[in-house]
Image (cartoon, rainbow, N blue to C red):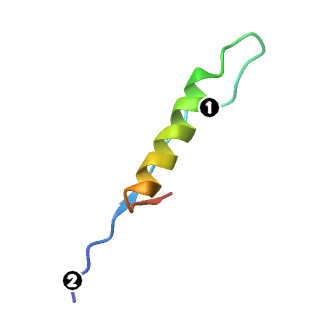
Amino acid sequence: MTSEAKKVLVIGSGPIIIGQAAEFDYAGTQACRSLREEGYKVV
């Protein structure tokens, strides 16, 4: 039995430190959103 599992593991940048910009967190969130729209299951 073969199946095409369209899954992606997204690894974030880790916890945000005070004074650090949140661009990395935002970029990861947007990447997950785009992948879901394309039909991938994001883990």
Across and down, in percent, residue 42 comes to 48, 57
Left or right side of 17 for 26: left
Residue at the limit of the structure toward the bottom, as seen here: 1
Secondary structure at numbered mark 1:
loop
Left or right side of 28 for 34: left
Dividing the picture into quadrants, the one containing residue 4 is bottom left
The disc at residue 2 is 2
Residue in view at x 21 percent, y 83 percent: 2
Reading the image, the residue beneath label 1 is: 14
- Type of residue at label 1? Gly
| CA gap, disc 1 and disc 2 | 35 Å
Residue 23's place in the image compared with 28, above or below, is above
Left or right side of 24 for 41: left
Residue in view at x 22 percent, y 89 percent: 1
- Crowding around mark 1 (Cα neighbors within 10 Å: few <14, some 14 to 19, many 20+) is few
Left or right side of 17 for 13: left
Residue in view at x 70 percent, y 24 percent: 16
The disc at residue 41 is none
Residue at the limit of the structure toward the front, as seen here: 37
- Type of residue at label 2? Thr
Residue in view at x 75 percent, y 10 percent: 19
